[in-house]
Structure formats: structure tokens, C-alpha cells
Image (spheres, rainbow, N blue to C red):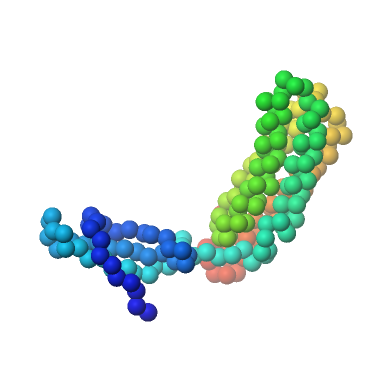
Amino acid sequence: MELPVASYQLPVTSYQLPVASLRSYQIRVSSTAFGSTNMSMEAVAVLPDSCERKRNPMVAHYQKLIAWQRAMDVAVEVHRISKSFPREELFGLTSQMRRSAVSIASNIAEGQGRGRSKDFARFLKVANGSRQELETQVILAHAFGYLSEADRDNTLSLAAEVGRLIAGLLKSLRTSAITSSTRPID
């Protein structure tokens, strides 16, 4: 396969440039003499592990993930229960709880959309952190007297289910990485 060759006036160095085809090209620029304008560049196709895009084999779209669906349920529930919080909490606990709940589903979607198992795993971990943040805020809201025991227990139960689903996805990604002979996901 013949690669394109072009000329540029650039300093002597090596560049990594992503290309629309999802491949990476290493560009080497060299000069024959100091201060010379005669420079050459060769493009060499490089496909290291870090440049490969591996689609998550489990689903084609994040909306089909049960973890994302349940995270959306959590966000809707948090919005519902936080409507009754005192007005002075609108920019405090109310806002934080809503942002944490939205963050769970958003990070699951973004991670799946990145297309690489390693990225997906990282975003699932962020989503799980947001879930734990939300659980803490729900417990605090109950302690402050803003939430009934039933609403607290229901929301914590939904969040715990999302946590189990995220843990299952992470385990599946680790297993898939091992069986496809790539490095395991941390």
C-alpha cells in the first residue's frame, strides 16, 4: 500500500495526527541543513493499540443498555422527589442531587458512544461515582427532613440496582477484553 507524501515547512520533529478514517499517521519531518527550507515529510501508517477503535460488542446504541434505562428512571425519580424540597435548597442540595442523577445516565451514554471498551469502562466508573454521590445526597436529604423514609428507600433501591448493572457491565468489559486477547480493563 502506497502512502501519500507531501512537503511542509515545519520544525524537525515527529507528529501524531488522527485521520478521519480512524487510523493514525506518524509524520516525520526532517531538514537536510540548519535553516534550510528543503524539508521532506513521509507519512507512515501506525496503528498502535491506543489508536484502534473497538466497538462495544454488547449493544449498538446506549439506549438499549438496561443500566442506562434504569439510570434514567433514577433521574426522573430524583427530579420528582426534589420538587418538594424547600426553596432555599434550590441551588444547594436540590441542584446537586439532580446533577448527580443526570450524570449517571449521561456518563453511561457517553462512555458507550466513545466506541472503545477502555473508554466505556472509564465512563462507567465515573457514572458509578455519581451514583454514590447521589446516594449520599439522598441520605442527607432524609436526615434534613426533606425526604420521607419511603422516598429515600425507593431512590436508594433504584440507585443500588443501577450500581449492580454498572458492575455487571464492567465485569463483562473485563471478560471481553481478556477473551479478545487485549489488555484487561482496569
* Residue at 68% in and 31% down: 95
Is residue 7 shown left or right of residue 87? left
Q: Position of residue 92 (x, y in %)?
A: 67, 25
Can you name the residue that lies furthest to the bottom here?
1
Is residue 155 shown left or right of residue 51? right
In this rendering, is residue 13 above or below 181? above
* Residue at 34% in and 74% down: 3
In this rendering, is residue 110 above or below 151? below
The foreground one among 172 and 155 is 155
Query: Which quadrant would the C terminus be assigned to in this image?
Result: bottom right
The foreground one among 170 and 43 is 43
Q: Position of residue 147 (x, y in %)?
A: 82, 28
Query: Which quadrant would the N terminus be assigned to in this image?
Result: bottom left
Q: Position of residue 101 (x, y in %)?
A: 70, 40
Quarter of the view holding residue 120: bottom right
Quarter of the view holding residue 5: bottom left
In this rendering, is residue 97 above or below 175? above
Can you name the residue that lies furthest to the top here?
88
* Residue at 60% in and 69% down: 179
Q: Position of residue 139 (x, y in %)?
A: 76, 31
